[in-house]
Image (cartoon, coloured by chain):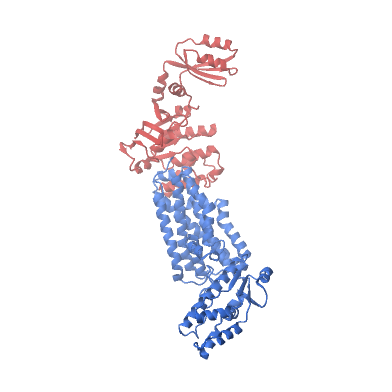
Chain colours: A red, B blue
Amino acid sequence: MIEVVNLSKNFKKVTAVDQVNLYIEPGEIVGLLGPNGAGKSTTIAMLSTLISPTEGDVLLNQKSILKNPSDLRGVLGVVPQEIALYQDLTARENLQFFGSIQKMAKQVLNKRIDIVLEQIGLQNEPKKLVKHYSGGMKRRLNIGVAMLHEPKYLIMDEPTVGIDPQSRNHILKTVKTLNENSNMAIIYTSHYMEEVEFLCNRIYIMDKGRIIASGTKEEIKAVLSSENTVHVKLEYHSKGFVNDLLEQPMLSNINAKEGEITFTVAKGMDFLPMLLSLCEKNNVILKSFQVEEPTLEDVFLHLTGRALRN
Amino acid sequence: MFIALLKKQMKILFRSPSEVFTLFVMPIVLILILSYALGSIMGGDSEMTTIEMAIIHHGDEQEQFRNVINDLPPNLVLDQQAIDNIENSLPVSLLFEELTTDKEMQNLIHVTQLEGKSLAEVKENGDYDVVVEIPQNFTKEFLQAKFFNQEKPAFNVYLNESEQITSTIVKDLVDYFQLQYTLQSELSENNIQINNTALPSAQINSTIRTVDSLEEVTSSVYYTFSMAVMFMLFVAGTLAGQSFIEKNTHIFDRILLARIHLGTYLLSIIVSSVVFTLLQVLVLFSFSYFVFHISFARWELFLLLTIVFSLVIGAIAALLSSINYRSNSAGASNLFSTAIVAILAFFGGSYFNISSLSPFLAKVGMWTPNGAALDGYLTIAQNGSLSDLLPNITILSFLAVLFMLLAFLLFPKRGGIV
């Protein structure tokens, strides 16, 4: 098990990470959810032994690794947010290089390269230079390099940033399959709520350097268990309508984006007459509305007053 | 694992057309251009331009000599031997003789003695690189100074500054003549035998040495080596720049996570640089061997010097990488490639023979890695021995150790996002 205890990191006067505690057990997928700048990458860098914490400790099987990071590095695979690949090498050459520096035996390495290329869906283009790959292919190879040596723990720092939906789906499925088939524990950081919701058993929500909520999906959503989330679609956006909604005491967590508005309302509260009268008052045509159980996005909005992607 | 680091480095470098062009094609082009363009003033494969010197003598030296001897006071009696000695070492005749009788000097300087012409007229004419003006009673005053301890007269030398190299050579010659003449006079006055003491032939103080024991170098030889050492410096900047890309793209994090020791990583930069510079030298020297027929018969000395210089390049690459990593920018390697190489090339004599500007600068140049290496290559090309090469090897070894120590000291102990 890897544990992070009261971990903090200051960069001059800025506190990037503030007293973070988390753990990951073998075989589970843990999500680290938070907006950009929340401190996820800095936490990951400390967890991966790449930067020293200002305060706190990182434990592997209850043993601190700060002075001797070698043991943890031996069981880690890290997928950085950046494309950490040689652009002038092919996919196979990149895998060969990173496998060699992991001191993998030549025969084992060649076998693993074939398996990994298939897992990441690049088996048909292993001899193309990485610089000629699409963004999605690079992201997939970025993951392939990290899992080549079959680490016990795989840390993925926003592995789907800036790619097309098809590649994103492929990556999510690969990660899920990897965890199910190899029992590899995965820490997955993202600011995409739906990715974390799809993949992870347990979730930590981070904002402004601190963990603001943690637990299983159900536990976190229980924060809003007495409320429903309502999605409203309008014919066109109306500022006056949104302003009127903001004045309604029964509504909370109002988030308006063009013609779509989301808010939470206490279960059993009859909000429909109020909604219709506001539409009439502002000459707004209501296209549809939908009442749902709250999502992680709603929880984040509830906890921070901001949407994840703002 | 170490081999993997080297193989990766080589593949990346050879797949970059701009690097291959800069490190292999550019030096070849420059060797070609400079060898032909500057061949005329480098000697060897083409003759150096003859220096035109005019000597304007306003008086008759023999007449002045006779007058001084005749007018000697009665208490100063000279025997015939002493009179003959003085007559044989009259300064103006000796200077003229020195410049015109020596065969090597004849190839270098063409002397014209002008009678009855004014200095202004000759200077205005502009046909001469150097004008030596001997005043009217120069010999008379010179002899009187000798006998009666009066103030010694001076003659004037006018150098054409637009012909900097030839002017410098002549200035060296004249200074040397004055020094030797004074020395000989002093010896004579102190009754030390001078009959068999020949005036030593003048030497031109220059990094392209023409010392008797060493052969002359051609411009193609000079520029093969000067361009090679300059472009080998670029390898250090290139490799340090590439290593910073590894940090910037977090590839270095992956290398650290693979439990590669920082020392091993730095060592891989050094060894990659050495291997790359050896390949570079092989290509450049092969080119000059086939195109200019430059001899590398003493290959073992060339190899020794190249390996030591390559180690310096590796050490510079490691040092620049360390500074880049520490400052979290590629500034150090960029500055090195865009400015420092040019400065080192200037002081090291890659553009032209720096000693023609100043012997002091030439000494400074010997302490630049490329300057020491260039001087070493030229020494081997001029049939210098291993012992002639030792000062160069010593300087280069010192620089290699110094830069390596600094590189290992400055390299940050962790990677990651800082």
Residue B96 x, y percent position in the rendering: 60, 79
Residue B52 x, y percent position in the rendering: 64, 73
Q: Hey, which residue is sitting farthest front in the picture?
A: B74
User: Is A291 on the left or on the right of A28, as rendered?
Assistant: right
In the image shown, does A190 or A25 lie closer to the viewer? A190
Q: Judge whether residue B271 can be spotted in this image.
A: no
In the image shown, does A143 or B341 lie closer to the viewer? B341
Q: Judge whether residue A136 can be spotted in this image.
A: yes
- Is B407 placed above or below B137 here? above
Residue A308 x, y percent position in the rendering: 48, 26
Residue A19 x, y percent position in the rendering: 36, 31
Which quarter of the figure is the N terminus of chain A placed in? top left
- Is B227 placed above or below A297 here? below
User: Is B411 on the left or on the right of B207, as rendered?
Assistant: left
In the image shown, does A245 or B256 lie closer to the viewer? A245
- Is A181 placed above or below B189 here? above
